[in-house]
């Protein structure tokens, strides 16, 4: 009799939200290179991001701040009200210290400038290593 062991490899589910198709595609390509990460959704605005998070239950959400319909800050606040465990990374072109503080106080785990793509990848790799 042969006993097979099932290995449960958890993948980190990630949703990104950015109104720029170029940024979304850039993030998609970068995250595809991260072992253990699975991009499960790409939203074009804050409202769509909130709906995707509710439906897909990702481990990590990457939010731009300036988006139509609902800003990334609005989405951040709504997502955080509904889920205290999800990792929220604000990924923006605005390196303002004041805006960073607003996002962190509203519940973001990280605030990165869009030039910090490697830091975003590092965060995802680190999160995968603890699951």
Image (cartoon, rainbow, N blue to C red):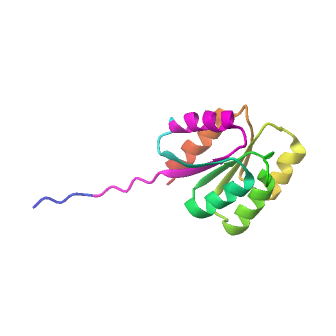
* Figure quadrant of residue 107: bottom right
**Would you say 73 lies left or right of 49 here?**
right
**Would you say 39 lies left or right of 48 here?**
left
Q: Residue at x 78, y 47 (%)?
A: 67
- The image shows residue 68, relative to residue 74, as above or below, that is above
User: Magenta includes 12?
Assistant: yes
Can the viewer see residue 107 in this picture?
no
Q: Residue at x 83, y 46 (%)?
A: 100
* Figure quadrant of residue 73: bottom right
Q: Position of residue 83 (x, y in %)?
A: 66, 66
Can the viewer see residue 27 in this picture?
yes
Q: Position of residue 105 (x, y in %)?
A: 82, 57
Magenta residue span: 6-32
**Would you say 25 lies left or right of 112 here?**
left
- The image shows residue 47, relative to residue 42, as above or below, that is below
Q: Quadrant location of the N terminus?
A: bottom left
Q: Residue at x 73, y 35 (%)?
A: 114
In this rendered view, identify the residue nearer to me: 21 or 66: 21
**Would you say 130 lies left or right of 52 here?**
left
In this rendered view, identify the residue nearer to me: 110 or 53: 53
Q: Position of residue 102 (x, y in %)?
A: 85, 53
| Residue found at the very far right of the displayed protein | 98
- The image shows residue 75, relative to residue 28, as above or below, that is below
User: Magenta includes 88?
Assistant: no
């Amino acid at each position: 009799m042969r006993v097979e062991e099932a290995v449960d490899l958890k993948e980190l589910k990630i949703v990104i939200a950015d109104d720029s198709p170029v940024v979304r595609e850039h993030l998609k390509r970068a995250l595809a290179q991260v072992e253990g990460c699975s991009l499960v959704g790409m939203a074009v605005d804050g409202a769509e991001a909130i709906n995707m998070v509710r439906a897909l239950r990702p481990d990590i959400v990457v939010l731009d701040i300036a988006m139509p319909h609902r800003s990334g800050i609005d989405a951040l606040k709504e997502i955080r009200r509904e889920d205290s465990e999800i990792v929220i990374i604000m990924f923006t072109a605005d390196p303002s210290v004041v805006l960073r503080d607003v996002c962190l106080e509203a519940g973001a785990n990280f605030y990165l400038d869009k030039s910090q793509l490697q830091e975003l990848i590092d965060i995802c790799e680190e999160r995968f290593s603890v699951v």
